[in-house]
């Protein structure tokens, strides 16, 4: 069984995660689940781009499993849990938590666009030392990948308009998501040195994007 880019266990994990987040989100649950679905759809679209080229360089990913689902969705789950708690013990505005949730998914979407589209560009360079490396190297980036990263963050951020119309918040989420993906690239550099892996980098990506969005939203 395969759905979007997930294998059987990945589909099961996504369904369980989606159900839990739907429950935790209460009245915002449908929106939270829509954002998850949007991420999956966008991810499938960019994964399919340049499939032949990716296969030739040995970088066409096999279906993602449950670990990928957890790595990409654990921060969103944490925010949804905070949203649920906030309904009973008010400590933040609901909008702030919705922005945080959207930013977490914007970050992993930006990272997905960067890796899946960026690899179709020319020779990448390591972000921290600007040395040219082979395609598919963690921690590297290309011009196309960078632009695509922001595009992915922005596309996911557009979902906020379903629940709250604000150009400022939309841009805030897009920028935070993009910077989350930049953080993933930095963590990727350490991956290449044996510190962490793609899952920890994905989680770090979402954390950075979420925290930045919250900080920016507080001062907006």
Image (cartoon, rainbow, N blue to C red):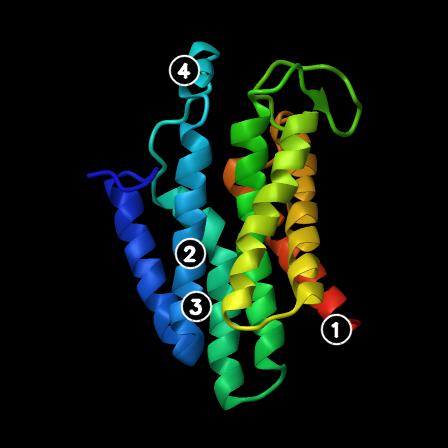
Disc 1 versus disc 4: distance between alpha carbons?
45 Å
Q: Residue at x 47, y 72 (%)?
A: 81
**Mark 2, mark 4: which one is toward the viewer?**
4
Quarter that holds the N terminus: top left
Disc 3 versus disc 1: distance between alpha carbons?
22 Å
Q: Is residue 111 above or below residue 212?
A: above
Q: 178 or 206: nearer the eye?
A: 178
Q: Earlier in the sequence, mark 1 or mark 4?
A: 4
x and y percentages locating residue 49 in the rendered image:
45, 27
Disc 3 vs disc 2: Cβ atoms closer than 8 Å? no
- Kindly indicate the quadrant of the structure image that contains residue 213: bottom right
Q: Secondary structure at mark 1?
A: helix
Query: Dot 4 corresponds to which residue?
Result: 52
Q: Is residue 57 above or below residue 73?
A: above
Q: Is residue 161 among the parts visible in the rendering?
A: yes
**Lateral position of residue 12 relative to residue 166, left or right:** left
Q: Secondary structure at mark 2?
A: helix
Disc 1 versus disc 2: distance between alpha carbons?
24 Å
Q: Residues within 10 Å of mark 3 (few under 14, many from 20)?
A: some
Q: Is residue 139 above or below residue 165?
A: above
- Kindly indicate the quadrant of the structure image that contains residue 89: bottom right
Q: Earlier in the sequence, mark 3 or mark 1?
A: 3
Disc 1 vs disc 2: Cβ atoms closer than 8 Å? no
Residue found at the very far top of the displayed protein? 56
Query: Dot 1 corresponds to which residue?
Result: 218
Query: Dot 2 corresponds to which residue?
Result: 36
Q: 99 or 67: nearer the eye?
A: 99
Label at residue 31: 3
């Amino acid at each position: 069984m395969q759905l979007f880019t997930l294998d059987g266990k990945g589909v099961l994990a996504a369904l369980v995660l989606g159900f839990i987040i739907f429950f935790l989100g209460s009245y915002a649950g449908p929106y939270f689940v829509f954002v998850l679905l949007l991420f999956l759809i966008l991810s499938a679209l960019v994964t399919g781009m340049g499939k032949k080229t990716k296969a030739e360089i040995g970088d066409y990913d096999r279906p993602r499993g449950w670990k990928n689902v957890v790595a990409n969705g654990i921060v969103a789950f944490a925010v949804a849990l905070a949203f649920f708690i906030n309904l009973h013990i008010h400590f933040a505005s609901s909008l702030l938590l919705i922005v945080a949730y959207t930013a977490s998914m914007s970050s992993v979407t930006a990272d997905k666009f960067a890796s899946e589209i960026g690899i179709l560009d020319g020779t990448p360079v390591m972000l921290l030392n600007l040395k040219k490396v082979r395609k598919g190297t963690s921690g590297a980036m290309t011009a196309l990948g960078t632009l695509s990263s922001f595009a992915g963050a922005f596309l996911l951020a557009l979902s906020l308009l379903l629940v709250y119309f604000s150009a400022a918040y939309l841009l805030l989420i897009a920028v935070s998501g993009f910077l989350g993906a930049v953080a993933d690239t930095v963590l990727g550099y350490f991956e290449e040195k044996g510190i962490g892996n793609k899952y920890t980098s994905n989680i770090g990506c979402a954390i950075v994007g979420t925290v930045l969005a919250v900080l920016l939203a507080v001062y907006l």
